[in-house]
Image (spheres, rainbow, N blue to C red):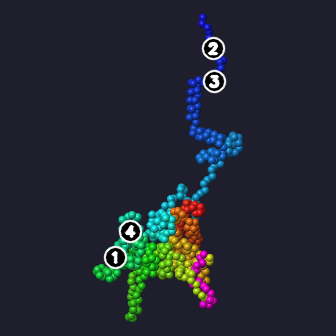
Amino acid sequence: MPKKRHQSKYSKPPSVAPPILSSSSSRAASEHQHERSVNQLLAELRRHSIRNNGPQSANSNTFNVATPTVPPAIRQILQIPETPAPAPRRPQRRDVNGRRVPPGPPPPRSWISLAQSCHAPADLADAAAAGGATTRIQHWPLPGAYVPGAGSLIDQALRRMALDWEQQRRWNQFYLYALPSRLRTALLAYVSEYYEPGVAARDLRLVLAGPADEALARYGVGKPDLASLNGDVFYLDLAGSVGKSVTVRELGELLFPPTAVAEVGLQDSWDSSEPVAGPAKLLPNLTQLSLAIDPGSTSSVSWKQLLSLAGKLPTLTHLNLSGWPEPSLTPNAKFAKVASPLTGASIQYGGTGPYSHTLDSDWSESIQVLNRLSKSLYSLEYLDLTGCGDWFPALMKESDGDFTIDFVDWVGNWGKITTLRLRSGYALPETHATRGQYQRIADWIEAAAAVEKHIRVQRHGRGRWITVEKDTLSEYEKAEWELD
């Protein structure tokens, strides 16, 4: 008979589970892992990272996940590790005036640098790119003046006429004054900018009044009526030509020709009206005038002539004096001295000496000149003093006058000014800018900010709100200045 086989009921279990069981257990674990939510997985990873690395390494991570906090007593009971401290916030970026700058990276230098501007003159951009000094400053057009679009047909035509002005004023002398008024004023601005000699007095007379009477009579052309011809001319931009090709006195004689005194005999009646003799004004409705100059023409302009012209333009609302030197009636006598006839001592001849501003902080003559100008131009609403940073303090200083204290009145005479431009007009070199250049620009910015604060304090709700346009140093320029 066959031998019976007995199977043991209490055998030693195998050390390795059967394949069937292992596959089923891994499947169950994976199903359990998939059943957990994303928040549970993140919380578990967070606990593991804090337990393994500690709070110090958690602070060093570039990406920290915000963890919910619990009270300290509950944390001790549950044995929850300390929550890592948040990373310190970055300091807020602020400009030189303390205002917060817009978020994001700083703007490119081509946006904020004058030398890289598309409206900057060619020599200004070339000199700044080469890292050298410039002989010109940036001139802004008058507000509201007609400026053709860059690259347009009118822009190219006027530019070509300005470059070829020597022939244009001779061959087209009978057609230039017949152009529309806005084209004539734009043409004068282009000639002043692109024609190297600049706009002369005869060019102004040719464009605004036509050829001379002899030339008109030779060809049988009638003399134009200036009142109807220039009745809609409100702007005159001579930036760059004043002090180079035309003086302020010539401009005044052109705009306001001297009246000839006619001999009038005895009248038969007291009621008869007196005859009015004299030529008409060339620009009867002129309200905006640009007398901006370049730094090389400072010795050719005269504040005395400007005061004489300002007395005839009380309706002027916009004035550009970019680049003008410090206000003085005797600029050539700055280093001159004379002997006193009473004491024999040597005294200063002019009102401003070589050390009046630096050592004595004496701006009395400049303040007096600006006061006389403000009394004549009491209708000003816009004043451009770009490039005049050396005498910005005269706009806010006080001086002892005759039993009074003299200062520029921003409430009464110039209380209507709402826009005051106090820019430098210069561009810092792209590379190799010295600390002295940075310091000069920073001093002008500080002086412009002080003038703005002084005007607002002086008005104190009694005048119009004023906007002072001034320069600002970019983050890159301030960093370069600090490195120097």
Looking at the rendered image, the disc whose residue lies closer to the viewer, 1 or 2, is 1
Which tag is nearer the camera, tag 4 or tag 2? 4
The quadrant holding residue 145 is bottom left
- Sequence order check, earlier mark of 1 and 4: 4
Cβ atoms under marks 4 and 2 closer than 8 Å: no
Visible residue check, residue 151: yes
* Label 4: element kind: helix
Magenta stretch secondary structure, dominant? loop
Residue 415 is inside the magenta segment: no
Residue 167 as seen in the image, left or right of residue 93: left
Quadrant containing the N terminus is: top right
Contact (Cβ within 8 Å) of mark 4 with mark 3: no
State the CA–CA distance, disc 4 to disc 2.
115 Å
Instruction: Measure how far apart labels 1 and 2 are at the Cα level.
Output: 132 Å
Task: Write the start and end of the magenta stretch as one range.
Answer: 341-358
Instruction: Report helix, strand or loop for mark 1.
Output: helix
Quadrant of the image for the C terminus?
bottom right
Q: Considering the numbered disc 3 on the image, is that residue within a helix, a strand or a loop?
A: loop
Q: Earlier in the sequence, mark 1 or mark 2?
A: 2
Specify which label sits upstream in the sequence, 1 or 3.
Answer: 3
Q: Nearer the viewer, residue 337 or 160?
A: 337
Q: Quadrant of residue 141?
A: bottom left
Mark 3 crowdedness (10 Å alpha carbons): few <14, some 14-19, many ≥20: few
Residue 7 is tagged as: 2
Q: Nearer the viewer, residue 358 or 260?
A: 358
Structural distance between the alpha carbons of marks 1 and 3:
115 Å
Residue 15, label in figure: 3
